[in-house]
Image (cartoon, rainbow, N blue to C red):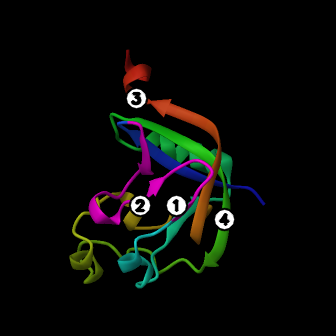
Amino acid sequence: MKYYKVVREEDGILQSCIVTGHAKVIYKVGEWSIAPNDFALYGYHILVFNNLIAAKKFASEVESNCTISVYEIEVSGKIKLPKSGYFHPANVGYQFIPELIATKLFYFWPRYTRMFERVKLTNKVWSFNEILQSS
């Protein structure tokens, strides 16, 4: 099965497209990435898609002034998805992760979402730049 990761590129750095601060993950093509230890201990690892169309749709809906890209990836260590809404501001977990951007992602997991301990970006398959699209 193929898996896909949506990332944002800011100042030449590939990173998590939704989370910021010490919650974000930095990615390098061809290298394994893991979630920060503090988050992994609470069962939160790296979210990916197992459907390219769903990944592209999600990427095109992210509000950002950066380039949002979808990469084909290798994965390792499948994790059962935590209960959706775990990081909602009303939950205790949010106090542990104050940098999370409150978006619909944390009210429910998007369809075709899976979670893994380790992710390796291998090949860019799609890219969206809102600035280019609006000019």
Quadrant assignment, res 76: bottom right
Q: Nearer the viewer, residue 72 or 58?
A: 72
Residue position for label 4: 75
- Asked if the magenta segment contains residue 27, the reply would be yes
Q: Nearer the viewer, residue 47 or 106?
A: 47
User: Measured from the top left, where is residue 33 in percent x and y?
Assistant: 53, 62
Dot 2 falls on a residue whose secondary structure is helix
Distance CA(mark 1)–CA(mark 3) = 21 Å
Distance CA(mark 1)–CA(mark 4) = 18 Å
Say which of marks 1 and 3 sits in front: 3
User: Measured from the top left, where is residue 54 in percent x and y?
Assistant: 60, 50
Residue position for label 3: 130
Distance CA(mark 2)–CA(mark 1) = 7 Å
The three-letter amino acid code for the residue at tag 4 is Val
Q: Quick check: 40 left or right of 115?
A: left
Instruction: Please provide the residue range marked out in magenta.
Output: 12-33
